[in-house]
Image (tube, coloured by chain):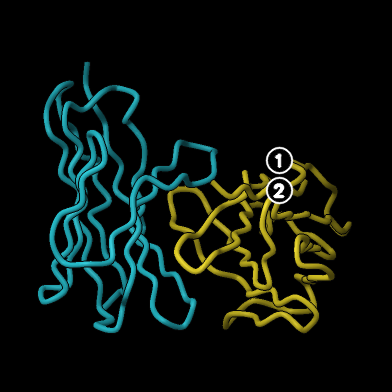
Amino acid sequence: GAVVSQHPSWVICKSGTSVKIECRSLDFQATTMFWYRQFPKQSLMLMATSNEGSKATYEQGVEKDKFLINHASLTLSTLTVTSAHPEDSSFYICSARTYTEAFFGQGTRLTVV
Amino acid sequence: QKEVEQNSGPLSVPEGAIASLNCTYSDRGSQSFFWYRQYSGKSPELIMFIYSNGDKEDGRFTAQLNKASQYVSLLIRDSQPSDSATYLCAVWTGYQKVTFGTGTKLQVIP
């Protein structure tokens, strides 16, 4: 099946710094990728939809200036958490879809100290 | 009303028993339904998807869909301790929007 690779799998950063998370579709082209956030014991919450070659679409309540998304190619989308704060600590997961299935990256555990 | 609802559990079943996980959804326009398994600290992994009313079987897993009643279920036969995880129901509408339930935690007791 299709594979989505996400990197890094975990990262610890200092408050105020920025962190970039990469999501790659390895064996198919993804014009659209999705970024989710999952807090402990909660479900996945969609943050934004990343569209190749155009601006991302953010869900209500998600700060677009804080969570920068770049989808520069058909196989790569990046999420940059800018000026990270401890409350941004969470599990971030990317997803790419074909017409019939959704595939997830391995997830990134972000801890802001 | 939440768009996709699941009982958070935990659902405890003895090893070898059948585990039954249920999910209801609110959008009648929903087209595709997915079950994911998520181990603690890991990303979700797809177990099954179903589009049509009725049952779909894959090994020990059976997905059941009833669009009229707006529910989808997952049966796990011969439950194993390794099946202990959180099971997420996901509903896909025609707008490329996938909504996840909060998940049901399953505990299979040896």
Residue at label 1? A9
Report the number of discs.
2
Q: Judge from the rendering whether residue A34 lies leftward or rightward of residue A85; answer left or right.
A: left
Q: Judge from the rendering whether residue A70 lies leftward or rightward of residue B62; answer left or right.
A: right
Decide: marks 2, 1 in contact (CB < 8 A)? Answer: yes
- Residue A79, given in percent of the width and then of the height, sits at 76, 63
- Residue B26, given in percent of the width and then of the height, sits at 25, 78
> Which chain is indicated by disc 1?
A
Viewer-side residue, B52 vs B108: B52
Q: Amino acid at mark 1?
A: Ser
Q: Identify the residue shown where x is 44% and y is 55%.
A: A42
Q: Identify the residue shown where x is 36% and y is 36%.
A: B85
Q: Colour of chain A?
A: yellow
Viewer-side residue, A32 vs A2: A2
Q: Identify the residue shown where x is 81% and y is 63%.
A: A80
Give the answer, above or below, for where A64 lies relative to B7: below
Of the residues tagged 2 and 1, which is closer to the observer?
A: 2
In three-dimensional space, the C-alpha distance between marks 2 and 1, rounded to whole angstroms, equals 7 Å
- Residue A60, given in percent of the width and then of the height, sits at 57, 83
Q: Residue furthest top?
A: B110
Viewer-side residue, B60 vs A38: B60
Quadrant of the image occupied by residue B100 = bottom left
Quadrant of the image occupied by residue A25 = bottom right
Residue at label 2? A6
Give the answer, above or below, for where B86 lies relative to B16: below
Give the answer, above or below, for where B105 lies relative to A100: above
- Residue B101, given in percent of the width and then of the height, sits at 35, 61
Numbered disc 2: secondary structure = strand
> Which chain is indicated by disc 2?
A
Give the answer, above or below, for where B21 lies relative to B97: above
Q: Which chain is cyan?
A: B
